Amino acid sequence: MSKRRLAQLASAVGNRQLLGSSTGRGDKPLWGVTYSWRRAEGCDGGKQLCSCPGFDALDKDLDLLYKYAYRFRTYSVECPDLMRMLLHYSTIDDRVSWLLGVWVGKDQAANQAQVDLLARLLEEYPHARISGIAVGNEAVSRGDATQTQVLGLINNVREKVNNLAIKTHNLGLSQLPILTVELPNYLTQELVAAVDVVGVNLQPFYTTKVNTSQSGWAAATVKGAIATYNQTAKKFPKKQLVVTEIGWPSRAGEADINRASEQLAGDFAKAWVQIADKLSIPYYYHELADAGWKTTLRKEAAVVAANARAARRALSHKQQFKPGQPVGVLSQGVLGDEHFGLVDADRTKDKQLFLI
């Protein structure tokens, strides 16, 4: 194929599909699963940073992931050695594919560093089975970036992938779909026009008060989520819509509007799979493991915030501030988003949601 034709294919933004999305879940319980490598023991709450786990830890995670699906979604590429391991494995098993994420946060330099790292990884592993590249995860709705900033990163990623496709004569790279992930109400015509595939996070646990003691609650809740999916798809009929998060947690706290338990999480999971299968909806179930790292970061952030408030009060009353005072419910509470995992945070307990 000529360089000119390859350039034409690479530059087009159109009706590309998430690669491998036309087939079902095969012999696995789920079509796809979201995955975060972070662990509580590797996180420093004071610095609000998490270190990358070792290869042995990743190997154990892969064993767990393969129990559930053949398709997986990451949120970032900020652990390059681990990403190399993932991409290598995907080149030797044609059943497995990865939707790679570029995390978009408030630090614009860090965002650009991830884009640059992504380009290097794609050049190193040109034949890895990558289903697409997701630029941002709720970056606009979270307030970490403006739509204009996200659009700039999307265009930057597309340019780098296109240039790499031309440089390496790689037709696969030229057809790699670029997407962004947002909540339904934050998907605009401008964002959607810039991508090939649209990723939408559906989390009815947060958006709808549900009577979980009522018979059939799970199926009804799933149907409500499907209705949101259909409404979003109708708004953007020319683009494939992929559910990039869906699930129900196994624990909840006082700040959450709905109840949660392993039984309820299992009820929802089974109802979702049954209906999504019937409607052939591509999705990534949220998530492999409980997010104990969020608990660690939140506790430390609450301590820092409370100490700052106490210091300001002491200063205003001309008193000496003594750090380490009780900081209240924020540092101790449980939140549902820490407990969406198919397994616990330590990876020692499989909740067996499909067997409950």
Image (cartoon, rainbow, N blue to C red):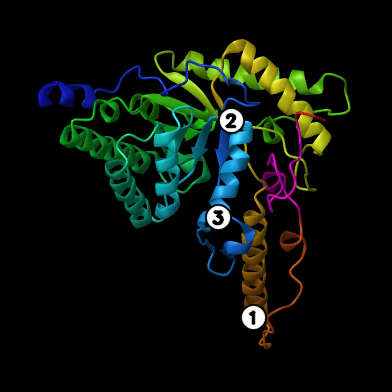
Magenta-colored span: 334-353
Is residue 16 inside the magenta stretch? no
**Is tag 3's residue or tag 1's residue first in the polypeptide sequence?**
3
Name the element at disc 1.
helix
Mark 3 or 1: in front is 3
Give the residue at mark 3: 56
- Residue 74 x %, y %: 49, 41
**Is tag 2's residue or tag 3's residue first in the polypeptide sequence?**
3
Image-quadrant location for residue 259: top right
Give the residue at mark 2: 69
Q: Residue at x 58, y 63 (%)?
A: 43
Residue 120 versus residue 143: which sits nearer the camera?
120
- Tag 1: Cα neighbours inside 10 Å, few (<14), some, or many (≥20)? few
Residue 59 versus residue 354: which sits nearer the camera?
59
Mark 2 or 1: in front is 2
- Residue 113 x %, y %: 33, 54
Residue 84 versus residue 312: which sits nearer the camera?
84
Vertical placement of 249 versus 330: above or below? above
Q: Residue at x 37, y 56 (%)?
A: 110
Name the element at disc 2.
loop
The amino acid type found where label 1 is placed reads Ser
- Residue 130 x %, y %: 40, 33
- Residue 106 x %, y %: 43, 53
Q: Which mark is residue 316?
A: 1
Instruction: Assign the magenta stretch its main secondary structure.
Output: loop
The answer to whether residue 259 is visible is no
Is residue 338 inside the magenta stretch? yes
**Is tag 2's residue or tag 1's residue first in the polypeptide sequence?**
2
Quadrant into which the N terminus falls: top left
Vertical placement of 142 versus 207: above or below? below
